[in-house]
Amino acid sequence: MRKIILKVISALTLSLSIISTSQVSAATLEDRLAGNNRYETGAKIVSEGWTISDYAVIASGEGFADALCAAPLAKKYNAPILLTGKNTLDSNTKNQLERLEVKNVLVVGGSGVVSDNVLSEIEKMDIEITRIAGQNRFETSLQVAKYLGESSGVVVTNGFGFADALSIAPVAAQKGMPIILTDKVDLPEQVKGFLSSKSYQKSYVVGGSGVVSDKIASQLHSVTRLGGSSRYGTNAAVLNHFASEFSYDKVYAASGQNYPDALCASALAALSNSPLILVATSVNPLVMASIRAQHYAYNNVVILGGTGVVSDSVANKIVTGKEDLKVSFIDVGQADSILIQTPNGKNMLIDSGNNEDGNKVVSYLKNMEITQLDIIAGTHPHEDHIGGLDTIINMFKVGKIYMPKVTSTTQTFQDVVTAINSKGMTITTPIPGEIVDLDSDVNLEILAPNEDSYEDLNNYSIVFKLTYGSKSFLFTGDAEDVSEKEMLNRGYNLKADVLKVGHHGSNSSTTTEFLSAVSPKYAVISVGKGNTYGHPTQTTLNKLKNVGADVYRTDELGTIVATCDGSNITFNTKPGSYNGGSETGSNNSGVVPPATTNKNIQIVSVDLAKEIVTIKNNSTQNTDMTGWKLVSVEGNQTYNFPSGYILKAGATIRIASGNAAGDLKWTGAYIWNNSGDQARLYDSKNTLISTK
């Protein structure tokens, strides 16, 4: 019998190994290493990498903290990492110890995570045991560092989350760098003392400043921070930074949601100097970009864990280096904004909502980890389509900008032009029939506008048809019956699975002939809840229902996301209703609805240039304006009177926008179209009271 050797230990060694990548034609899914539980999966991972080993590292399969620093220790002895329960040696682990003919076991963690009973079971196998542990996770990482010996580098990461440590673990193991755990704010005193006594030349902080503070980073020598806004952003940062040093003959992928599979895999990846990719139910866009950047060199992809943790769909994305096509119809109220994310990581934005929606769209793009828009299209110069474009152009790197050949005198349009000019860019005019170079795996065709001049700005709308595999999307902006007829007359193939319904579901678009040619299975309507236009109209919804199209509406469902793999289309939500908005007071057919005979409250004047609307109460009674609305028809904008606002008998008020001053301030944005715009006043029952 060998005695159990209890030690309290720690230290550092840099072994830089640069293995050149070789270009291959395509990656293949070599294997999925999975079992019925974490211990069985861990055993299969070990079987993949080791046939015999004098050493093995054992860590808890129930708590990640102590085990995070185990990979460099395992690499030092070319040993696997095996997992066990707290009180009993797992049978899968026991079988591996016997199969590998292990003579020495290094147990990482105290008796609170791997009990002395487990050590006794191992001792009965005539295996010498060394426990490496401290009073807490930070001290344990320090003891492992001391046990490793001298190193010229060190890794510091947060000890309260497992993902960042596992992202760097194969690299740290390959380079012989210890992984030192810390809390968010400052290094533990023991760690400070240890680092001050060492002559390491390089340090890596893994994780953003939200998990490892700048204060900690400032205490390290020659520090490089590898971090992102999430665990996957950090994983991408690690993959990118060491991209030229990895060997891509084998690429490993594990769940970033749970630690056991990735922990065991960190030692396996270190054996071949392979990258370890962390995924969730999908592949993070930044991680996907890292995969694409090196995918030409990928040879064999190995998935760690069953389909319950890494789905076949996710595995296929890593193997192919391609994502599904994703189309987001962003909820910007009574406006349009559509984000297209292509299989090869290209991004296109069609419209951007109103002026006040710019920041909302920016936030959505950033949440999607988007840093560049390859194409921006402003379908036509109405504020509810291009209002946020200047904000977005100023915030992102932009490849190309499409807008129709028509100008507007509104400040909104001028702001967009100024933003484009400030970036030294030019506007690309759409050419009907042109194929736009967005992504080699998709076909993007321009179908409208087909004439140079229209009476209504809506008909200048750029219409795009996007095809991926056997599925297609038709994006129509606010194109009305005039433009729809032109597309039909041109003989374009309008058939599409998904139709972005024109002009928010107005009667002015979606003619029977056009809808018959498109024959959509799904229809998406971008529309504001309770809008004063009555959108979407019951007439349009009845047409969609009659052709069997499921309707998805942003007023009912919020942001709608369609995902397409080239053969199937799925949505992030169930379809909405076929219940139309009130058509009272709407501008769906181009006919101005009649105002009521009530002349007590009237729009006296509209100064389009000065952005001032004057309204007078001609009655002898005070009027509560709660729920009343003032609408700019051409700009498609609505001003809601403040709750409780009283327009006194005989009083006149001025509602100002832009730089104008008045009794009530609508917005700092410029609302009224100087080329012609109509103001409409609605009461709390949505009855049209006055027009001007």
Image (cartoon, rainbow, N blue to C red):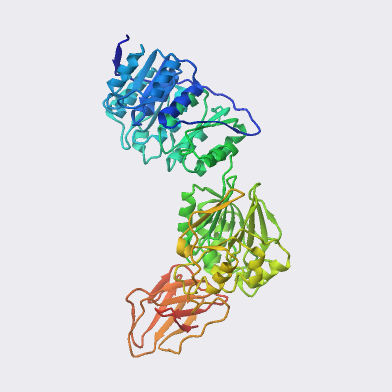
The foreground one among 634 and 44 is: 44
Q: In terms of image quadrants, where is residue 385?
A: bottom right
Q: Is residue 173 above or below residue 395?
A: above
The foreground one among 87 and 510 is: 87
What residue is at 54 percent from the left and 28 percent from the top?
246
Looking at the image, the residue that sits furthest to the top is: 1
Residue 359 coordinates in the image, percent (x, y): 46, 57
What residue is at 59 percent from the left and 35 percent from the top?
295
| Res 36 seen here | yes
Residue 452 coordinates in the image, percent (x, y): 69, 69
What residue is at 40 percent from the left and 76 percent from the top?
662
Q: Is residue 421 above or below residue 186?
A: below
Residue 276 coordinates in the image, percent (x, y): 49, 32
Residue 195 coordinates in the image, percent (x, y): 34, 24
Q: Is residue 601 above or below residue 431?
A: below
* 300 displayed left or right of 437: left
The foreground one among 581 and 352 is: 581
* 388 displayed left or right of 132: right
Quarter occupied by the N terminus:
top left
* 128 displayed left or right of 51: left
Q: Is residue 229 above or below residue 544?
A: above
All told, the count of numbered labels is 0
